[in-house]
Amino acid sequence: MFVRTVEPAFYDTDALGHVNNTRLPAWFELARNDLFRLFTPDLDPRKWKLIMARMEVDYRAELHYGNEIEIRTYVSRLGNSSFTVTQEAWQKGELTNLGHTVMVHFDHDTKRAVPIEGELRQALEAHLQPLEEPTDA
């Protein structure tokens, strides 16, 4: 699991006084950089080996300015050429948001999916953990 901390800026808030829902997908993408480096260590877009096939975010609670947000990133499913990245946003000990992004290992020249094999598969397996839905108290 990768963990990053985000400190919301004042401009991240909206008229309702909490962090705007559009900020979370951007923070999730930033936190996926750790996984992206497994495919493209220098993050050079000319060498990019991934495409996004799907993204969903469950907004479970508000996020607030003035408190750090911990983004936890891990692989919850590893297929032949695709994998699901699950991300959790935590603030003040509460799971506030849950995201799932399906990424595909992709050859942009041939426009085809590429199998995830060898050291790359092992690196992803090191971050594989089954998705456990938190129970509501």
Image (cartoon, grey):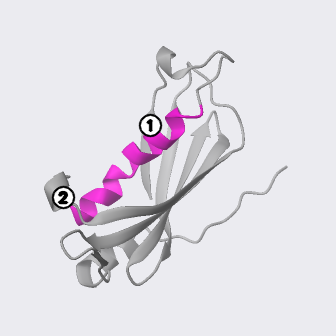
- In percent of width and height, residue 29 lies at 41, 47
- 50 sits to left or right of 17: left
Q: Residue furthest right?
A: 137
What is the three-letter code of the residue carrying label 1? Thr
Residue under the image location 49 percent in, 44 percent down:
71
The local secondary structure at tag 2 comes to loop
The local secondary structure at tag 1 comes to strand
**What is the number of the mark on residue 41?**
2
- Among numbered discs 1 and 2, the one appearing first in the sequence: 1
Looking at the rendered image, the disc whose residue lies closer to the viewer, 1 or 2, is 2
Residue 123 showing in the rendered view: yes
Q: Which residue is mark 1?
A: 5
Q: Is residue 73 above or below residue 130?
A: above
What range of the chain is rendered magenta? 21-41
- In percent of width and height, residue 89 lies at 57, 43
Q: Nearer the viewer, residue 5 or 47?
A: 47
- In percent of width and height, residue 101 lies at 50, 59
Q: Is-magenta flag for residue 48?
A: no
Residue 42 showing in the rendered view: no
Q: Quadrant of residue 130?
A: bottom right
Q: Is residue 80 above or below residue 88?
A: below
Q: Quadrant of the N terminus?
A: bottom left
